[in-house]
Image (cartoon, rainbow, N blue to C red):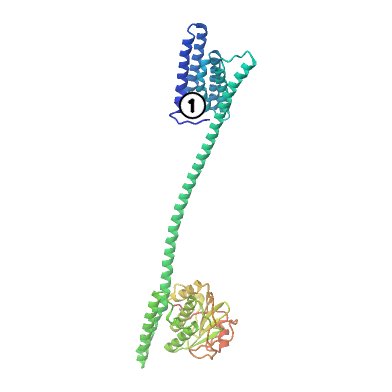
Amino acid sequence: MGELSEPVWPLRLTVAPYVLLAFLTAVTILIKRDQPGSLTVDLVLCAVTGLWILGMFTLRPAWRTRPVPVAVFVTVFVLLMAVLVVRDPWFGFLTPAGYFYTFILLPWPAELLGVGAVAVVAGTAQAYDIPKTDVLGLLGCAAVIGVNVVGMCLAAWLGRRSDVLSRQRQDAVDALTESNQRLEATLAENAALHDQLLTQAREAGVHDERQRLAREIHDTIAQGLTGIVTQLQAAEHADDWRRHLTAAVGLARESLTEARRSVHALRPQPLQSATLSDAVEDVVRRWSALHGIDGRLTITGNPRVMTPETESTLLRAAQEALANVAKYARATRVGVTLSYMEKEVALDVRDDGVGFDPSRRTTNEAGGFGLVAMRQRVEALDGTLEIESEPGAGTAISATVPIAATTAPGTATPGTTTPGTTTPGPTASRPTGSARTAPDPTASSATATEATATGATGLAPGVSG
């Protein structure tokens, strides 16, 4: 069915047929004024046609889109038009109204049949003067009708094809518009998600930085202040108070330096110009001299260079564990073991202090951030932190992290285990054993290594930084 805009189609369908019919009626009156009988019949037919258009189409707009009433209306109109054409050929000028109705009102393929029927009427009117008494006349008449039918049906098919293509283009445009709208909605959603991810990343970055600063403050300023307080308290009751005062000043300066380096996220000072084993050895030696506790370092395996994060984590773990021993354990001897294995490195700190019951320790315990910070550092490198202790049997702490970077063998040389010294062991593995079965942290290299076999470690009561 053809589709016209609302201002155009009413003029073609409601005005043009009446104008054509009125004009042809006037022509009929002029031509047949001397034939009253024939004129009367023609006038009656014209009146019936006009009333049919008025009653079935003009006064019933709701029927214009209903297939059955439209089909009845067009069929009767074409028949009336055919009767008028047979009587008077000039009524062939009414066929444009028939084409308007068939092209616009009838659906496909009924449109093709209606157009063909109107074309037959139009061809009959055009061939009215051709003699039909011989074969040639009949062929001429058939040719005229055929030309009309073929031409108008072809026009109907082309119009239908044009409508289909237009509808397809419109559907494509609608689909593209819908796709663009969905794309815009998706882009808007993605932009919102991007902003949300940026916000979450920012918040995560702020949180991580706060955690890092909290750990650094604890490992530098807090431990330094604790050491300073300890030295000043010792100076109050000691004859050689100058030695304690000098140690306190040294701790203050070291803490200030480390705090500045922490603010700039730099490596700890001991690792700037030394390997991990050398840095841990220096920490053990100075801690032992500062607190007057026998501390010894044992190295097993081949020392190697690791990532800065790994070395910093293990050094901070050693510092935190030794600080806890000095604060809580009341130990007389401490053993530190640094074990280089094929795919991981472990740091074990053992003491012969009072120990504690790990099952009774709570995370709300005062001063407990040190152990939490140590665990965060180790687990951030996919490592493990283990604690093993019992009252009266000492404590042990073990931090194990994977070796994630290409490493190179260290340059440490074998030696004996002495207070504050380093002794590389002959192997790169940790024998099986338990921290609680080795209360003597000053045992030989093999014994010390065996004592930390499981990596299980612990702290004295309240031993948490």
Could you tell me the amino acid type at mark 1?
A: Ala
Residue at (47% x, 13% y) in the render: 27
Query: 42 or 306: nearer the eye?
Result: 42
Looking at the picture, does residue 141 appear above or below residue 289? above
Q: Percent from the top left, x then y, of residue 133?
A: 63, 13
Instruction: Return the residue found at the far right.
Output: 135
Looking at the picture, does residue 72 appear above or below residue 197? above
Looking at the picture, does residue 77 appear above or below residue 281? above
Residue at (40% x, 77% y) in the render: 261
Q: Percent from the top left, x then y, of residue 432?
A: 60, 81
- Number of dots carrying numbers: 1
Residue at (48% x, 10% y) in the render: 31
Binning the other alpha carbons within 10 Å of mark 1 as few (below 14), some (14 to 19) or many (20 upward) gives: few
Query: 250 or 161: nearer the eye?
Result: 161
Query: 250 or 464: nearer the eye?
Result: 250
Whether residue 107 appears in this view of the structure is no
Query: 343 or 234: nearer the eye?
Result: 343
Instruction: Return the residue found at the far bottom.
Output: 239
Disc 1: which residue? 62
Q: Percent from the top left, x then y, of residue 276?
A: 49, 82
Instruction: Return the residue found at the far front.
Output: 136
- Quarter of the rendering occupied by the C terminus: bottom left
Residue at (41% x, 74% y) in the render: 265
Q: Percent from the top left, x then y, of residue 126?
A: 55, 18
